[in-house]
């Protein structure tokens, strides 16, 4: 009797076991929330943990709209609409903002262009930024902000029949000898022909009003970093020591000659800096030390004369 | 056999009937209890919608862990905090995680984000002067960045922001160290590692491995293996905007090209790293320098004009603020300009 009872319910027990094993029963994954959390207590007691979200986002959406923050308002209404399908207000607002935002972005963009054309660059920038805030994919606003409002470092020239690079260089730079520059920036050969239609791009050569703001002079850079080739191999792991020494000797000689040029041009302080660099590269340089002494004596004499 | 044939169908009918009833009861119980996925579960902690996920924070969850889980990148933590308008996550708190987080250019209705790029040169154990920052002060400055919630980002992240390609945390800062002083390894590097900050070294290659106070290629290799980037400050640190005396324009231009290309090639050869950025010696640039750098595939150029950088700034005229050794902490902090107010409506 007992056997028959078990045998009769075997499929039922099997079904229960499968359900249990397949994880439909409480799994360790869904761990109990910490008792300290009231919200999780709410969850335990069966309350929907997201029940407060739609109203919270409805309030947020209205506040964003009031502030004129349309993209954030739209995102908030979308949250409400997703949580409460069929919510009339959310559906209406989403549809309305989806139309309103691109239209407002376009409006800002066109205002920006009008300001730009009227040389009111600060106002133009503000309008382009507003357009981008509303629509980050507004490519033309990006182009105005990043290119047209900043100014170009290059010029363009449309080749005409009979033009040569020398002729273009003469027209653009007032110097036909700068033809190599146009060739370089346009991937052309200097001797090669120019055939229209061709748009040449070349750098502006007028210096921009860049103010020198470095707190350190060129001479300081040269003198501060004491050079000593003897110490290099230890840090560099002791490889190709000889090659490094040769490089450093050559560099020392280059600085020495630079110093001589400065000295000849009566730029005594610059000459001293160069020779000091020479000495730090090549402490046993045959002339640098003596030349520094001579130059310092000369400087002292000049000081006295003044 | 006959007897069995007569009994079995009756038994099977009864057994099947009980089975169907049992299963039906189980199913109803399960549905009622919320075990089926389509029903609202009291234990549910996340719900996915088109474009976002709603999540109830569990004990131990942080914005960073949620960003790692749902956005596959823990560094988007700042975005989740900002989107939900909360500073810290509490267990049981329901938050929204947009699945395509984006805030390019750091634009808000109140204005736009700017990124300060700090420029250091030499560091020393205790001495300081205009171009040399003491170790103690450097440590204090790095600590201040952490305490006040600044995020140090890499040069690539900064340029993604500049090119309007990606969003970065609202208080982002970039750290650069110029020239190739040995102190970048001995003093700055351990402190940067301690705080987990990336930094970019701008080297002039002539000096590397040749001067007692300069870095070697071996040390640079070690640094690049641990998050320090190496970029170019030319070969010889000459002023790129000024032809030297007796240098023809053609020679000047050829030398300019060599300064930019040679530095790039040397770093590539020595460290197997691509150079993308150029710090102009003395901060001086002109259009010829910029166009040459562009031609040689540089992505950007950095000046030493003080100020933050908005996304619409020129990528070859990046502002950089020199940190002087005689700065107080508050003077240092004044260089951390991360937002420009401008009502956008």
Image (tube, rainbow, N blue to C red):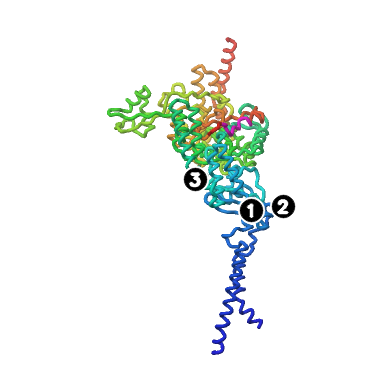
Q: Which residue is under mark 2? A: A36
Q: Chain of mark 1?
A: A
Mark closest to the chain's N terminus, 3 or 1:
1
| Residue closest to the eye, A65 or A30 | A65
Using the rendered view, name the quadrant where residue B224 is placed: top right
Mark closest to the chain's N terminus, 1 or 2:
2
Which percent across, then down, holds residue B14?
58, 79
Q: Are marks 3 and 1 on the same chain?
A: yes
CA distance for labels 3 and 1: 28 Å
CA distance for labels 2 and 3: 42 Å
Mark closest to the chain's N terminus, 2 or 3:
2
Which percent across, then down, holds residue B274?
49, 40
The numbered disc on residue B180 is none
**Which stretch appears magenta?**
B333-341
Dots 1 and 2: beta carbons under 8 Å?
no
Q: Which residue is under mark 3? A: A95
SS class, disc 2: loop
Q: Which residue is under mark 1? A: A49
Q: Chain of mark 3?
A: A
Which percent across, then down, holds residue A90?
54, 47
Q: Is residue B334 magenta?
A: yes
Using a 10 Å C-alpha cutoff, classify the residue at mark 3 as few (fewer than 14 neighbours), some (14 to 19) or many (20 or more): few
| Residue closest to the eye, A226 or A164 | A164
Which percent across, then down, holds residue B289?
46, 29
CA distance for labels 1 and 2: 15 Å
Task: Give the label, 3 or 1, closer to the camera.
Answer: 3
Is residue A101 left or right of B175 when viewed as pictured?
left
| Residue closest to the eye, A223 or A263 | A223
SS class, disc 1: loop
Is residue B109 left or right of A171 when viewed as pictured?
right
């Amino acid at each position: 009797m007992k056997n028959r009872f078990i045998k009769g319910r075997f499929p039922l027990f099997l079904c229960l076991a499968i359900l249990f094993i397949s994880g439909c029963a409480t799994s360790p994954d869904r761990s109990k929330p910490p008792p300290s959390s009231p919200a999780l207590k709410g969850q335990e007691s069966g309350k929907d943990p997201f029940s407060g979200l739609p109203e919270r986002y409805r309030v947020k959406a209205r506040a964003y709209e009031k502030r004129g923050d349309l993209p954030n308002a739209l995102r908030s209404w979308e949250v409400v609409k997703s949580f409460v399908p069929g919510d009339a207000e959310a559906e209406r607002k989403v549809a309305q903002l989806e139309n309103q935002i691109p239209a407002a972005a376009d409006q800002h963009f066109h205002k920006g262009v009008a300001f730009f054309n009227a040389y009111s660059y600060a106002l133009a920038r503000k309008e382009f930024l507003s357009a981008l805030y509303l629509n980050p994919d507004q490519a033309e606003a990006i182009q105005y902000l990043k290119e047209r409002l900043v100014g170009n470092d290059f010029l363009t020239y449309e080749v005409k029949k009979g033009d040569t690079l020398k002729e273009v260089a003469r027209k653009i730079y007032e110097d036909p000898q700068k033809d190599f520059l146009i060739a370089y920036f346009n991937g052309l050969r200097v001797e090669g022909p120019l055939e229209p239609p061709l748009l040449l791009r070349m750098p502006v050569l007028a210096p921009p009003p860049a103010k020198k703001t470095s707190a350190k002079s060129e001479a300081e850079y040269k003198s501060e970093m004491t050079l000593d080739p003897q110490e290099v191999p230890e840090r560099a792991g002791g490889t190709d020591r000889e090659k490094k020494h040769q490089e450093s000797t050559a560099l020392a000689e280059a600085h020495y000659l630079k110093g001589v040029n400065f000295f000849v041009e009566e730029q005594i302080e610059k000459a001293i800096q160069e020779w000091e660099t020479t000495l730090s590269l090549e402490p046993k340089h045959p002339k640098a030390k003596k030349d520094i002494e001579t130059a310092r004596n000369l400087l002292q004499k000049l000081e006295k004369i003044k | 056999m006959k007897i069995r044939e007569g009994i079995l169908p009756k038994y099977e009918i009864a057994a099947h009937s009980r089975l169907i009833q049992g299963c039906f009861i189980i199913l109803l119980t399960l549905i009622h209890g919320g075990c089926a996925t389509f029903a609202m579960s009291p234990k549910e902690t996340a719900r996915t919608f088109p474009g976002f996920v709603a999540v109830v924070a569990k004990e131990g969850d942080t914005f960073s862990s949620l960003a790692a889980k749902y956005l596959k990148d823990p560094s988007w933590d700042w975005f989740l905090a900002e989107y939900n308008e909360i500073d810290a996550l509490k267990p049981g708190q329901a938050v929204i995680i947009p699945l395509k987080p984006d805030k390019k250019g750091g634009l808000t209705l109140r204005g736009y984000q700017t990124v300060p790029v700090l420029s250091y040169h030499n560091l020393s154990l205790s001495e300081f002067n205009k171009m040399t920052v003491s170790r103690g002060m450097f440590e204090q400055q790095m600590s201040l960045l952490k305490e006040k919630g600044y995020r140090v980002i890499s040069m690539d992240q900064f340029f993604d922001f500049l090119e309007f390609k990606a969003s970065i945390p609202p208080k982002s800062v970039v750290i650069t160290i110029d020239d190739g002083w040995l102190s970048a390894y001995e003093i700055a590097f351990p402190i940067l590692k301690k705080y987990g900050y990336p930094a970019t070294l701008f080297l002039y290659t002539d000096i590397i491995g040749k001067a007692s106070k300069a870095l070697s290629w071996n040390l640079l290799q070690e640094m690049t293996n641990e998050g320090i980037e190496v970029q170019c400050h030319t070969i010889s640190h000459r002023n790129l905007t000024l032809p030297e005396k007796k240098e023809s324009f053609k020679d000047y231009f050829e030398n300019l090209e060599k300064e930019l290309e040679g530095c790039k090639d040397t770093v590539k050869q020595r460290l197997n790293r691509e150079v993308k950025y150029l710090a102009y010696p003395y901060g001086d640039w002109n259009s010829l320098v910029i166009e040459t750098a562009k031609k040689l595939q540089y992505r950007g150029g950095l000046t030493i004009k003080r100020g933050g950088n908005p996304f619409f700034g020129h990528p070859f005229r990046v502002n950089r603020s020199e940190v002087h050794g005689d700065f107080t902490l508050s003077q240092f902090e004044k260089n951390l300009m991360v937002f420009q107010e401008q009502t956008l409506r």
